Amino acid sequence: MLAYHSESVLFDMGFKSLGKNVKISDKASIYNLGEIELGDHSRIDDYCVVSGKISIGKFCHITPMCLLAGGHPGIIMSDFSTLAYGVKVFSQSDDYSGESLTNSLIPTEFKNEIFGNITIGRHVIVGAGSAIYPGVYIAEGCAIGAMSFVNRSTEPWGVYAGSPAKRLKERSRRLLELESRFLNQISNDSI
C-alpha cells in the first residue's frame, strides 16, 4: 500500500500551487517545489523524481518510477493525462554527437545542450518505459505504446508506438463522453 504525505505536509512543502485532494508518495523525490503546480485530484506515486518547472493538471496520474525533468523550459501535463510505470520526460538533453562535452558536471560553455518545453495534452496516456524528448507536444487524446521513444510532436487522437514513435491508428474519442459523465457525477456528489 502506498503511503502519501498528509495535506498539511504538502501545503508546508512550498509548491507554487497545490490543488485539492493531491496525493504524493512519501517515497517520491520532488525538487524545485516553488516551480511546481499541481491540479486537483492528481497523484504522484513511489520512486518518482520530479524537478524543474512543471505544471500538472487535474486528475493526472504519475505512476511509480517516473522521471519528469522539467529544467528551465518546463513540462505541462494537461488534465486527465497519465504516465505509466517508468516513463521518462526530458525538457533538456546533452548533445550526443561528440561535438561538445556532456553531463551536468561540465560548464555550459563546453556543452551544446538541447532545450525545449514539453506539453502532454488532455487525455494522453504514455505507456510504460517510454521516453519523451525536448520540444515534443503530445496532442490531445493520444496513446503512446509501451517502450516508445517520442522525439517528434504528434497529431491529436492517435495511437503511437515504436522507436521513434509513429502513428499506428486512430484512438476512440468515447472517453470525452465518459469525462462529461464523470465530471457531472462528481459535481452532483459534492452538492
Image: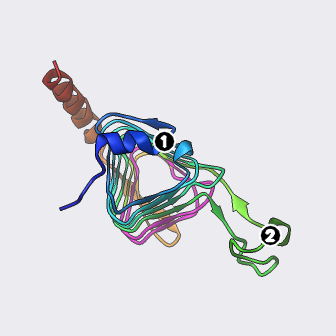
Q: Nearer the viewer, residue 8 or 131?
A: 8
Q: Which color scheme does this rendered protein use?
A: rainbow
* Extent of the magenta region: 127-154
Q: Position of residue 175 (x, y in %)?
A: 26, 41
Residue 122 at least partly seen: no
Residue 92 occupies which quadrant of the picture?
Answer: bottom right
**Among all residues in the image, which is located at the extreme right?**
109
Which sits earlier in the primary sequence, circle 1 or circle 2?
Answer: 1
Q: Residue at x 82, y 78 (%)?
A: 99
The stretch drawn in magenta includes residue 151: yes
- Counting other residues with Cα less than 10 Å from the Cα at mark 2, is it few (<14), some (14-19), or many (20 or more)? few
- Name the residue that disc number 1 marks: 14
Secondary structure under the numbered disc 2 in the rendered image: loop
The tag on residue 107 is 2
Q: Amino acid at mark 2?
A: Pro
Q: Along the horizontal axis of the image, is 184 left or right of 146?
A: left
Q: Amino acid at mark 1?
A: Gly
